[in-house]
Every structure is written in C-alpha cells, then in structure tokens.
Amino acid sequence: MAKLIIAVVLAALCASAATAAEPYPVKPVRIIVAVGAGGGDDFAARQVAAKLSELLGQQFFVENRPGAGGMIGQTFVAKSPPDGYTLLLAGGSMAGARYVNANMGYDLLRDFTPVSLIETSPFVLVVNPALPARSVREFIALGRARPGKMTFGTLGAGQISYWSVVLFNSMAGIDAVEVQYKSPADAILDIVAGRIDYVFTPVINAVGNREKLRALAVTTRMRAEMLPDVTTMAEAALPTYEMPAWRSIMGPAGMRSEVVQILNRAIARSLESPEVRERFLKAGSVPTPSSPEELRKRYEDWIAIFGKIAKDAGIQPH
C-alpha cells in the first residue's frame, strides 16, 4: 500500500513538473477586445496580434466581445483560465471604472495579470470654430461666462474622453451640459455643425477634421507629433492637467511568470518593429512597451488619480 501511495505521489509530481515546463505557446492565443470591431482598441490589438503570431509561431487572433461599457469582455478574461491563451486588450479607463460603475464584475489589481503597456496617446480639446475663443484661456473665460449653457460630448461615463472633460471642467470651473454619443465620429459631426460646443477626441479625429474645427490643446504633458503646433493643456492654462490615454495587454490573475515574460519580450519586439511602429504613429499614438511591474504601477497610480478626480467633481458610481 505504501509503495502504491509513493507511486501515485511521484506520478503527480512528474505531471506537475511537466505542466510547469510546458513550452508556450503550443496553441492559438486569443486577445479579447471589449468593444466592437473597427475602433482604436481593435486596431491596436490586431497590430500586436499579427506580429506576435510571427514571432512566437502560433496564431494570435482578436475576438471582439463588446457590451456593458467593456464589462462583458473584461469580466470574461478575468474569469478565464490563467494559462496565457486568453488575454485582454485593456485600456487606461479601466483604472477609473470603479468610480462610475457600482456593479463591477472584477477588481483590476486582484483579478488581472499585467503583461505590458502597448501605446500611449493624447486626446485633443476641439471646439466649434464659430465660438469666439481661439485659445484655452479664452475658452475657459467663455465657459465661465455662460454657466449651464455650453455643451460637451462624451461617449458615456468612464471613457478617457469622459475623464478628460470632467477634469477640464472641474479645474477650469466650467458648468456645462453633457451630450452622449455612440462614437467619436458622431460627436465630431455635431461639433462641425455647431450642435455642441466642445469635445475631447483622439488625435486622428482632430487631424482628419482640422479644417472644420478648432483644436485648442492636447491632454498629455508632451505635444502630439501629428499636431506639433497645438499646445498642451498644461502649457496653455492648467499647469497640473494631464490625462493620457493608453492601451495594454493583461491576462487573468495567476499567470505563470515564465509565460508573462515570454509575452512581455515578444510584445516589446513587436512594438520595436518599424512597420508596427509606423502604423501606430500614423494612428496618432506612440508605441510604448513596459515591464509588467511598470504596468501594474501605472494602474495603481491612476486608480488613485481617478479617485481624486471623481471626488473633486462629485461623481458617484451608479
């Protein structure tokens, strides 16, 4: 009997060792994008997936799981096996989700494994060109002079465009009316038509409509390469203002460190490739790899920042 028990234990240990030593990847890997196809998240995920397929010898493919403001896809990944075969294209807005959503299906720091940052990008404050404001300071003065009468566009609570305008309004002392849109393009159309006054939009949208709207400032500390003549918000009027957008790759909590490191190194190589870098730059973002530890620290820091913004602006989760 003792020999049988020893044999069973040894077999289990051998199986465990074999599993731990299993190479990665040995089958296709899916990257979940928690929004529909065609947007910036989808674009970023597909660029990285194609290069990872080439570098790691297995297919990395994108699977769109939109719904509930990203919660469906994000929760799906959080509850997936932590084997490295289900990953998430995660946005910076996830750090602020707890402050606008009372029914979170996950805890960002507890339920995910950080793998690598992918890119960072600014948003741009654009206004209707008919408004008598040609600078951020003039626009702030105009907004303060029209309490409750100015209108701004968002994609709903929790997106970076939302946090950008919430922080701006709070710091500038502007009381304005929110108008929600389904896409950045719809908001831009209404800016051009004069149906709303201002919105924070991705750089690519501002560049593509440069002749039809007025770009006043970018939300990052550095100016945008595609809009070098547009000042930063901090330079223009609000010295402590900063609201970058970013995307990263995350996995479920509990991923093996060897798998995380394989993915991290491959993502860095992907972003260093000239063709991938060029595609990101043309889309208005900067390829920005990181270590897993740096990514976790970024989310920790921004959870605290979004918490302060929400408190100062009186935002309550609902």
Image: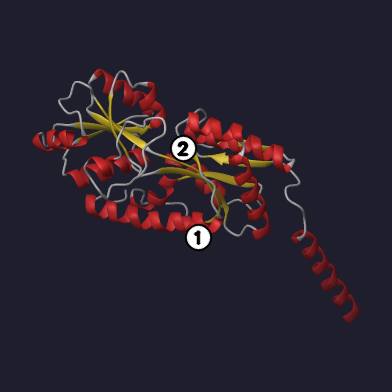
Q: Quadrant of residue 261?
A: bottom right
What residue is rendered at 37% in x and 28% in y? 184
Q: Quadrant of residue 179?
A: top left
Left or right: where 272 falls relative to 75: right
Q: Is residue 271 visible?
A: yes
Left or right: where 252 falls relative to 309: right
Q: Position of residue 78 (x, y in %)?
A: 54, 52
Q: Position of residue 204 (x, y in %)?
A: 41, 28
- Extreme residue toward the front, this view: 229
Return the disc, 1 or 2, that comes first in the chain's sequence. Answer: 2
Is residue 81 placed above or below 166 in the rendered structure?
Answer: below
Amino acid type at mark 2:
Gly
Q: Position of residue 295 (x, y in %)?
A: 50, 54
Left or right: where 178 falls relative to 210: left
- For the N terminus, the quadrant is bottom right
Is residue 159 placed above or below 106 in the rendered structure?
Answer: above
Circle 1 Cα neighbour tier, 10 Å, few/some/many (<14 / 14–19 / ≥20): few
Q: Compare residues 241 and 21 and report the one nearer the observer.
A: 241
Question: Are discs 1 and 2 less than 8 Å apart at CB?
Answer: no
What residue is rendered at 58% in x and 53% in y? 252
Q: Disc 1 marks which residue?
A: 110
Amino acid type at mark 1:
Arg
Residue 303: image tag: none
Q: Disc 2 marks which residue?
A: 67
Is residue 105 placed above or below 30 in the rendered structure?
Answer: below
